[in-house]
Each structure stands twice: as structure tokens, then as C-alpha cells.
Amino acid sequence: MWWLRRNFCRSRWCLTRLYVHMEVAGQEASGYGRDETMLYLKNGYMIDPASGTEGYRDILIDAESGKVVKIVPPGTSMEEVSGGMGAEQAGRGMDGGGEQAEIIDLNGQIVAPGLVDVHVHFRDPGFTHKEDIHTGAAAAARGGFTSVVLMANTKPAVDNSETLAYVINKGNETGIHVYSCANVTMGLQGKELTDMETLSAQGAAGFTDDGIPLMDETLLREALRRAAKCGKPVSLHEENPALIKNNGVNAGKAAAHYGIGGSPREAEISMVERDLRIAAEEEADLSIQHISTKEAVELVRQAKKRSGHIFAEAAPHHFTLTEEAVIRHGTLAKMNPPLREEADRLAIIEGLRDGTIDMIATDHAPHSAEEKAKPITEAPSGIIGLETALSLGIRELVDKAYLSMMALIEKMSLAPAKLYHLDAGYLAEDGPADLVVFDPKKERVVKDFASKAANSPFVGETMPGVVSYTICGGKIVYRKETV
């Protein structure tokens, strides 16, 4: 390594201490407390949907500024790499303080923008026995996510400045970017709008009453108008409760198996049809959350032809499973909206393929084992998803040739970042040093979680796509343990 030290010191940027890490796997840890101020990622296969870049690159990261300093082809001389340092960074190398670097040979693994999930539940405040902001962030980092947007159905709800500030401040204590939506209505009651302008100014990423549909059409129109003036999207849970006898289970084979009424597809279709029309008329950004029916996919497809304000998200479980999973796994596969039929699953995949569905979002919904052990009609709906989402995208979409890896990364990073106006989802010099490194071929058995919860129907399955590193703000926030 003498040539590396010589070339670094030949430039104005001299590393007085050099840490070399030539294996892909290190110790699984948060990475907090490490004192390296530079990271140099070698021999990674970079995929960046924003620029369309795909190929082998080396990436130099300044952990102090949290920025990408240089992206170069492998084999670029260290003198040329160090020549890309800005004056401030170069000055730090000359002031006697001593720069430190960790060099990581990725051995051809994919390096991509850190994943962005705009639909997660961290249950904090109010339900921290299920999850809290710190454990949720740890689960996100382990899954390759560097940015998440929290839903606002907490207790108290995020319908006021104090609760929003609590969530944002606690999120700032984690190693990733934690954003939060605010509620559309006070107390999620669907009767009175929140002070959307104030909440937006104080950092709300968007507005939602997720989990509870907004039934008052007049109120929805006003919410869309006010959110549009704030430049923030409204995201809606689309299920009409008047049509549902038992939530979380499709009104079909699964409901018949349990001898219950279930949740019919019309509950989603009717709401999606109404809300797409209103959003187009109001010219406001609307995101249809966790779409589950083929009819809703088609409604979104047609609405997009008429309006540029329509967006939709799909959850990994909806493009992977059908109602058969509820029969096999019981409450571990109970969710809102429910898993539907094979035709619906394939329609969601086609929607992802042709751009009708813009993004993949997990709807990470932790619950305790005791809660999920209740009977099918009493157990809460939802599954965790942050630590399996990338693997499911690879297995179900890329490996089966529905999407390219580039397209998958775009739907899991750039597209959701754009909707919520986040500085994320891309890799570029002087851009945020938020990255995920993963091996799409390496397999793992799903058996433990960083989340507090383990309510997943995928436990015990072997999946491809092992995350080796998650880097956020230039710091390693997750490092895969040595196998």
C-alpha cells in the first residue's frame, strides 16, 4: 500500500492514518463513534437512476460534510482522486489535525442511492411496545434505507406542532433521515383540518390520515388545496369502511376459509375512483397508498393520462403474496388493504413495470407477538417490511425479469424522494453521501430483525439480496456481520 500513501501525500491532502478494510463483510454495527473522516469505496457496481449511470465506480466520501466528493472509474490514480477535494477538505488535511480514511473493497457489489421509504409506522409516540423511532431506524438501516417518512397515526396524533417536533427531534438522534407526515384532520377524526400551513412550515413532509380514509369530500377538496399551496403531497388510505365486514382479509377465498365477511375489493375501488377525480380537479399532488386491486391500478393508469398530479405506491407484500398467504399464515398475513387474488398481484407488477405505480413503499407496521396471536377478527392488521423489501424486489421483480435493477432502485429511492421533495435518491459529486451496498445474488434466511417486532409471513424464507453496508450522511450506519 506504499503507493497509496505516497500519492495521497504528494497531493495537498495527506492522510496521516489509513485504515484499510479489504473484505466486504465487517462487524455488524451502527458505525457510530468511528473516527474516520473519509470513506473510499472501491470496485463497486454503481447504479444511479437519476443520471442513468450503471457500471464500476470508486466513490470517495467525506464523512464530515456528509457529501460524495468524487466518483471515478476503478483504477483512477489516488492523485487524481485527491485532486477532487475541495479547499475546505484539503485544508483539513493540512492543518495538522490528521485525516483518517477507511477503504472498503466492494468486490463488485452493487452500490446505489440509499433507499427511501415514504410509508412507515414507527409507533412513537404512544405505542412504543411495538416499535420506537430508534428501533425503527435501525430496521431501516439494516434494510438499506437512509430516508423514511413516518405516518402520523400515533397517540397523540401528529396533528399539532408539539408532537411533530417530538418526532422530528427524536428522528434526528438516529443515524438516518427520519421525516414525518402530519395529519390531514385533527385526531384523525375526519371532521376538522389541521393547521396544515403551520405544520408544513415546521417540517411536515406531507399529510395523511393513513389507516383511516377521508370520507368527507368537501373536507378532502380543501385539504388538497391547502396542501398544494404548501407544496406537499396528500397520501390517502383508500378503503370505504361502510363496505367492510372484517378488515384485513379479502372478501373471497380467505374470508370463506375463516367464515367471515372480509373486505371486498369495491371498498378500495370506490374510494380510489372518487379521490383521483377530486385530485385532478384541484390540481393537487395525491398519492394512492398501498394499492391492492387490479381495478384501482387501471383507474390510476387512466388518471395519469389526464393529470400530472397522480401518484401511487405498491407494498412488497402486495406484489408478492395473495390471499392464499392469509390461509397459510393467519394473522401474520392480515393487513389493510388485504392481500387479494393472483390477477391483482400481476396487475400491480404490471403497474410497476409500465410506470403506473411510481414507487415501492413498505407500510412497515410492527405489532407485538401477543397482539398477532389473537383470533383473525381481533388481531391488528399489518406486517413489518423494512428488512425484507429490497430482497422481495430482487426476487419477485428483477430475478423474474419484470424490472431491471435500475428500475427497482428508481422505485425504491429516486421516485419516492421526488414526490416528497427530499434531497435523496441519487448519487452525484457534491450530493448527499447516502448509499446502500448489497449483493443481489447472496442469500440469507429471514430469521431475526432489528425491529422490535417480528410480525412477518416471510420468516424462515431464503431470500436474495444481502445488504453489506448502509451509509447515511457519509457515516456507516449498518455494517453486515462476518458470516
Image: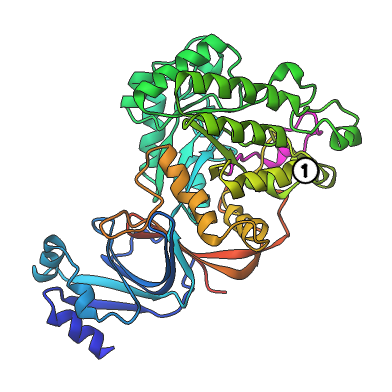
Q: Which residue is under mark 1?
A: 343
Instruction: Return the x and y of residue 132 as percentages of the image width and height.
Output: 51, 40
Q: Nearer the viewer, residue 415 or 330?
A: 415
Q: Residue at x 88, y 37 (%)?
A: 253
- Please tell me whether mark 1 sits on a helix, a strand or a loop: helix
Which segment did they paint magenta? 362-380
Instruction: State the image coordinates of residue 165 (x, y, percent, origin top left).
Output: 36, 29
Tell me which residue sits at (64%, 66%) in the image. 444
237 and 97: which is toward the camera: 237
Name which residue lies at 34% across and 75% down.
73
Tell me what residue is drawn at x 9 percent, y 70 percent. Answer: 94
Quadrant of the rendered image containing residue 97:
bottom left
Q: Position of residue 164 (x, y in %)?
A: 40, 28
Q: Position of residue 412 (x, y in %)?
A: 51, 50
Q: Eyeballing the image, is 404 above or below 366?
A: below
- Quick check: 235 above or below 91? above
| Residue 14, picture quadrant | bottom left
The quarter in which the C terminus is drawn is bottom right
- In this view, the residue farthest toward the bottom is 2
Can residue 36 be seen? no
Amino acid marked by disc 1: Ala
In the rendered view, would you say 295 is above or below 55? above
